[in-house]
Amino acid sequence: MTERHRDARDGHEHQGATGGAGEPPPAEDRDTLRRAWAELVSTARRTVADGLVVGTSGNVSVRVGDTVLVTPTGVPYDRLTPDDLVGVGLDGGQVLGTLRPTSELPMHLAVYRGTEARAVVHTHAPHATAVSLLVPELPLVHYMAAAMGGPVRVAPYAAYGTPELATNTLRALDGRTACLLRNHGTIAHGASLDQAYDRTAQLEWMCRVWLLASSVPGLTPALLSPEQLADAGERLRGYGQQG
């Protein structure tokens, strides 16, 4: 265990002594929570392996009933174990674990309170972050924008971990399943960790495509019309294996 990891544990044990909101989940739900934690850790490690985050940047959460499992702050994902499970209630009070939750907890909880999300992935993906510096929304370079509810907006900048960032994010996600965070990164949600992650990866790819196309001197990228995007959205509803 690193000193940083040990400090995170010790710091929260002291904080826990003062009490907090939330009630621990029933014992019969522990197996479900352990399985969800294992999937969360796997997803978090994938964000690093795929180059979407560096070090301990970014964070991942999944909702199990009224408990939100979330990555802890300042702990490298490859060092997380089953014993490091961290869970909070929808009110933000810690109900599981001794490590402190991610500093972006207000943003995650805002998404759960304001949408039907069951999982949230936040990254500092490089191409998406670059796009967030340039435009108020990602230009319609590809029909997969329809899978995110339409043109992907950029939430105005606010300091990380603040209620202001949570508010800006929720506004940018209105009617969407992903958005960019100006000078910061991305956030995407879904009905599962796999879906939230897939949307994150797709968003990063679309941002890379736009940056590549727009960097060619003397040429302007062709964009989809709103009608073309709507048509793609209808087609995507029937995509994949049904039933």
Image (cartoon, grey):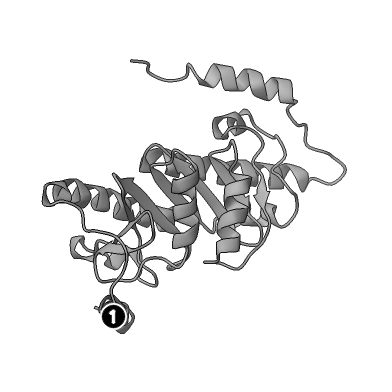
Q: Nearer the viewer, residue 86 or 171?
A: 171
Query: In front: 210, or 216?
Result: 210
Judge whether 242 appears above or below 193 on screen.
above
Q: Which residue is outermost to the left?
A: 28
Residue drawn at point x = 37 percent, y = 18 percent: 241
- Total marks placed: 1
Looking at the picture, how far across and down is residue 180, in whole percent?
61, 50
Residue 204 visible in the displayed image? yes
> In the image, what residue type sits under mark 1?
Thr
Location of residue 240 with respect to 195 vertically, above or below: above
Instruction: Name the image quarter holding residue 47.
Output: bottom left
The residue sitting at 57% across, 38% down in the picture is 176
Point out the image quarter for the C terminus.
Answer: top left
Please indicate, yes or no, whether residue 52 appears anywhere in the rendered image: no
> Which residue is depicted at the point 66% across and 58% down?
182
Residue labelled with disc 1: 2
- What SS does tag 1 mark? loop
Q: Residues within 10 Å of mark 1 (few under 14, many from 20)?
A: few
| Viewer-nearest residue: 44 or 136 | 136
Dividing the image into 4 quarters, which one contains the N terminus?
A: bottom left
Whether residue 202 is situated above or below residue 184 in the rendered picture: above
